[in-house]
Image (cartoon, helix red, strand yellow):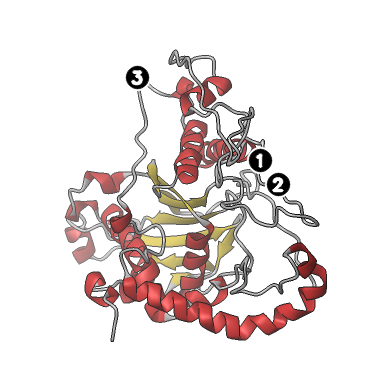
């Protein structure tokens, strides 16, 4: 088996961003970005011969975000006179010691750079996990540095209770989805464990002589390629999230039919996890089977193509005051690449000559198929 190299952090390529065809105007952008580089979420393989550190001194930047911002800009000074110090399991403290799963200094830099790139290209919600919230803080600071904001402006970071969260596959609130994921994991074990056997000679010595298996201790994380190839898994895992996007795009495209001011936003940034990005890509059948890197992102862009009055029928012109007849398209991007969605491949479902621009109608039709009509009911475990 040939091991694929680990991808580094994925930054937005502003210079080579593909300009839309003539006549398309960008109206709205939805971004789902994985948090920045973090420490391991638990201690693994710390004994020889692997000797992977249990403690990581990679968090020298001040624990307080306000202090972090002050490090980037001399305009911020909140007068904090204390600092947070991590104590390890042995009761020892050290400068720059990270918590498990904490955003590292490198992660803070990469997410700040991501925000700065967003500002060059074109706010906000996060899952209620410390590293995603902190990532979003740095992204927002890159998009809107203090020098570009009105005095006393404080951006809001929006989070939800775990039971209401839809930025991740919510197995906490959806027991049926938890059962499906367990079934998928068991199927993955049956399919892939035998393929991992050739690695035993190289890897087992680092994990106390045990074989490397998907269900081993430690586990090999390898179920992402099967979880969201189930229509039910897609519906329960990503349906609600995509329904939110689809409805907001509809409201943006037809403002005369809605008074929802929150749908008039032009840029919405959501910080989340690798599992969400993989699930979104799998749901639309464009996942490349590679683990999403830190600060990689899935982007949905809504474009508007204005139809000149000379090309409209009399009825269209008469209805223009209540229904915007312009055409709208959605482009999905990942790893600085346009995604050509199979669901939009047919003639009439994409911009002629540009298959990466899916018609909003085709996009919404597929999302509607994925949207649970009764999410609570569908999530109830079946006997």
Q: In the rendering, at what x and y percent does residue 335 appear?
A: 61, 56
Residue nearer the viewer, 353 or 226 = 226
Residue sitting at 33 percent across and 44 percent down?
265
Q: Is residue 154 left or right of residue 109?
A: left
Residue sitting at 41 percent across and 24 percent down?
149
Q: Is residue 49 left or right of residue 255?
A: right
From mark 2 to mark 1, how far is it between C-alphas?
7 Å
Disc nearest the viewer among 3 and 2: 2
Task: Check disc 1 and report the residue beneath it.
Answer: 56
Vertical position of residue 232 compared to residue 291: above or below: below
Q: In the rendering, at what x and y percent does residue 249 appear?
A: 33, 57
Q: Which mark is residue 53?
A: 2
Q: Is residue 251 visible?
A: yes
Q: Does dot 1 land on a helix, a strand or a loop?
A: loop
Q: In the rendering, at what x and y percent does residue 301 appear?
A: 45, 55
Task: Check disc 3 and report the residue beneath it.
Answer: 152
Residue sitting at 35 percent across and 19 percent down?
152
């Amino acid at each position: 088996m040939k091991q694929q190299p680990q991808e580094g952090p994925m930054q937005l390529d502003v210079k080579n961003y593909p300009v839309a065809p003539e006549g398309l105007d960008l109206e709205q952008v939805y971004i789902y970005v994985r948090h920045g580089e973090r420490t391991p979420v638990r201690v693994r393989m710390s004994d020889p011969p692997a000797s992977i550190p249990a403690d990581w001194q990679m968090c020298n930047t001040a624990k307080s975000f306000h202090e972090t911002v002050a490090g980037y800009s001399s305009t911020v000074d909140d007068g904090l006179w204390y600092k947070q110090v991590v104590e390890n399991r042995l009761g020892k403290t050290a400068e720059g010691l990270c918590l498990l799963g904490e955003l590292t200094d490198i992660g803070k830099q990469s997410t700040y750079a991501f925000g700065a790139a967003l500002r060059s290209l074109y706010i906000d919600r996060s899952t209620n996990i410390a590293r995603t919230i902190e990532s979003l803080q740095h992204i927002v600071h890159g998009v809107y540095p203090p020098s570009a904001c009105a005095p006393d402006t404080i951006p809001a970071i929006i989070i939800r209770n775990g039971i209401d969260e839809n930025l991740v596959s919510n197995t906490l609130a959806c027991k049926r989805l938890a059962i499906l994921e367990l079934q998928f994991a068991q199927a993955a074990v049956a399919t892939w464990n035998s393929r991992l056997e050739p690695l035993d000679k190289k890897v087992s010595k680092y994990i106390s002589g045990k074989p490397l298996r998907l269900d081993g201790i430690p586990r090999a994380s390898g179920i992402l390629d099967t979880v969201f190839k189930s229509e039910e898994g897609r519906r329960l895992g990503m349906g609600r999230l995509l329904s939110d996007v689809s409805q907001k795009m509809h409201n943006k495209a037809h403002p005369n039919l809605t008074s929802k001011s929150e749908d008039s936003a032009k840029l919405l940034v959501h910080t989340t996890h690798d599992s969400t990005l993989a699930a979104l890509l799998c749901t639309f059948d464009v996942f490349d089977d590679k683990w999403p890197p830190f600060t990689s992102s899935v982007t949905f862009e809504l474009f508007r193509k204005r139809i000149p009055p000379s090309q409209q029928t009399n009825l269209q012109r008469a209805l223009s005051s209540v229904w915007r007849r312009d055409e709208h398209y959605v482009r999905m991007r990942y790893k600085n690449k346009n995604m050509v969605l199979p669901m939009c491949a047919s003639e009439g479902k994409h911009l002629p000559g540009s298959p990466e621009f899916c018609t909003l109608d085709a996009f919404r039709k597929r999302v509607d198929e994925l949207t649970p009509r009764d999410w609570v009911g569908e999530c109830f475990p079946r006997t």
